[in-house]
Image (spheres, grey):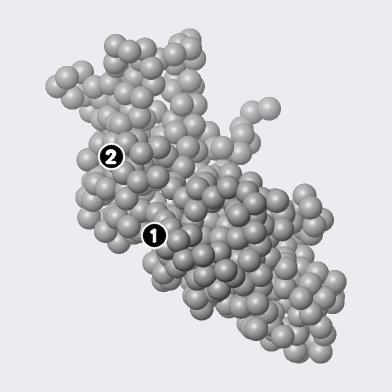
Amino acid sequence: MPLRRLDLLAPAENGLRRGRTTGSCATAAVKAALLLLRHEQVVTEVDVSLPDGEHFLTVPVGRVERLADGAVRAEVLKDGGDDPDSTHGATITAVVRENTVGELRFLAGAGVGTVTQPGIRVPVGEPAINPTPRAMMRRAVAEVLPELASPGLDLEIGCVNGEEIARRTFNPRLGILGGISILGTTGVVEPMSQEAYMASVEVYVRVALGDRPDAVIFTPGKLGRDYARAHLKLDGKRLVQISNFVGYALDAAQTALQELNFELDTLWLAGHPGKLAKTIDGAWDTHSQRSPMAMPAVARVARDCGFGEALARRLEHANTVEDIIVQLEDPIRRDLWLAVENAIARACHARVPSVRQVQVRLFALDGTPLGAAA
């Protein structure tokens, strides 16, 4: 079935404009550079296939030029839509050159970081280009060069002023040095500008509770959404995507329940502990630029629940929450995440006393269930 074009000018459900991830921009730059390198085509836009297998984006391309060594460099402007983003307006670059090893290799150009510590989804020593953007770029190469099973190409991805931009992110603390990360799991930035998104969250919460259901689920994104549909059979208006606005969503639920004079039986919260565990420390807006990292909260739960000081210190100094997930082995891993789920539930329940019980389910970035779901 042919892919359908996703029009970024069409507003999202909350009325805001979507944008392109750094991964989509890098993929577009790779495709434009490769078209000149191999087919002598200079383009001003390219189609980028999205990871959902159903849609593509048409992405404008800036300068495309041959370099002295025979490689080709292309530029794409990052447009985050109406979402507040550190990389909005940045110039993402790709230099594509042939190599003699017969492999497709990813390199960090100026302004893209290199991973120096474990705990994220890219091995130490590799460019900070996440798995989904890598897959998108491989597909773009296959679309331009379908006849080559194993193209010998180096894809050097960069960002103009990327090292300066990265200082406004968590990259330095994550051990990603030298620039930004190339990110995105869908290729599309969903607009989450704070005031408008909060207003839409309140509407969705009220709709979810309006006919007095037995249960609803709040989730920051895809991990919780998948669990709600597959295991809880909660979908449609019973599923509220709250982004980073955990506290606001809970307060909206409590207000709506009081107005309805109704007590909800179960409120589910599902997602990654890197976001939800922040609530244990009272961080109710979990955006990375507006809240601390979650490792200290997880470490404190370990101390309070008797897991021992040595483990607590290890957790406290972990690079990321995902690093904690990878390092721990069962049964300690399941027991710890059960304790974290219970701590999150207690913190959140205090904000919604009109709910009989809050149930929390946590997942690793790859969807692996932790805690009670494991």
> Compared with residue 284, is residue 139 higher up or lower down, i.e. above or below?
above
Q: Residue at x 32, y 13 (%)?
A: 101
Q: Type of residue at label 2?
A: Gly
- On screen, residue 79 versus residue 343, left or right, reads left
Neighbourhood count class around disc 1 (C-alpha, 10 Å): few under 14, some 14–19, many 20 upward:
few
- Say which residue label 2 marks: 158
* SS at badge 2: strand
Q: Give x and y (percent) for residue 271.
A: 62, 59
Cα distance, mark 2 to mark 1? 30 Å
In this view, the residue in front, 57 or 95, is 95
Q: Residue at x 34, y 35 (%)?
A: 126
Q: State the image quarter where residue 254 is shown.
A: bottom right
Neighbourhood count class around disc 2 (C-alpha, 10 Å): few under 14, some 14–19, many 20 upward:
many
Q: Give x and y (percent) for residue 92.
A: 31, 42
Q: For marks 2 and 1, give the one nearer the viewer.
A: 1
* SS at badge 1: loop
In this view, the residue in front, 128 or 157, is 128
**Which dot marks residue 317?**
1
Which of the two labelled residues, at mark 2 and mark 1, occupies the earlier sequence position?
2
